Amino acid sequence: MIKEVTGDILLTGAQAIAHGVAPNDHFDRGLALSLREQYPAMAKDFRHYCHTFGPKAGDVWMWGTVDHLRIFNLMTQDPAKTLNGHPGHATMHNVNVCLHNLEKMIKEEGITSLALPKLATGYGQLDWNEVFPVIKKKLENIGIPIYIYSTYVKGQKAAE
């Protein structure tokens, strides 16, 4: 089941949040920044993961909190061309690969519910009308509630 909601994704009751980033992302804009502010250890662990494993666009890295929230970092964007540069734009190819990998990880981890923003449409610059059908096709039949935060309202809990 996929349901579009309005609210603050950081207040979700879902077991997992997935969002788009780039390999070696600095987590300095948008939802990634909010996640870094709320979970500074995640950003530090992500940097370590990237330096150790050198992930590519299309990869997914999962991080978890002590209260069992899981955050899936979907590498929908191409990496920055320079060390301090901004990441490249997202691509539909990267989104497809990420969603394929996410589906597999959701099943392996036994995730029971998932919250997503309008994936790859902010700084990734993709068109939501192209991304949403791909999300539906890849995730609609995995048997868990999926909440798409299509409208962000800071501090407002969504009616999931």
Image: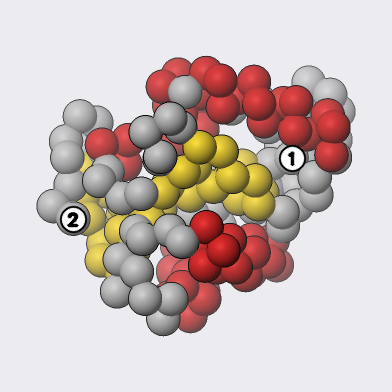
Query: Where residue 23 is drawn, which disc sits there?
Result: 1
Q: What is the CA distance from the residue labelled 1 to the residue labelled 2?
A: 30 Å
Question: Is residue 6 something one can see in this rendering?
Answer: yes
Q: Tell me residue 85's x, y (percent).
A: 77, 26
Residue at 31% from the left image edge and 41% from the top image edge: 9
Single out the residue that lies furthest toward the left: 159
Give the quarter of the image for residue 21: top right
Name the residue carrying label 2: 160
Point out the tag, 1 or 2, that comes first from the N-terminus.
1
In this rendering, position of residue 139 left or right of residue 56: left
Q: Residues within 10 Å of mark 1 (few under 14, many from 20)?
A: many
Q: Is residue 124 visible?
A: no
Mark 1 secondary-structure assignment: loop
Compare residues 19 and 141 and report the one nearer the observer: 141
Please tell me whether mark 1 or mark 2 is closer to you in this view. 2
Q: Quadrant of the C terminus?
A: bottom left
Quarter of the picture holding the N terminus: bottom left
Where in the figure is residue 140, as x and y percent of width and height?
40, 77
Question: Image check: 116 left or right of 89?
Answer: left
Q: Nearer the viewer, residue 25 or 86?
A: 25
User: Going 52% across and 76% down the picture, which residue do you hit?
Assistant: 138
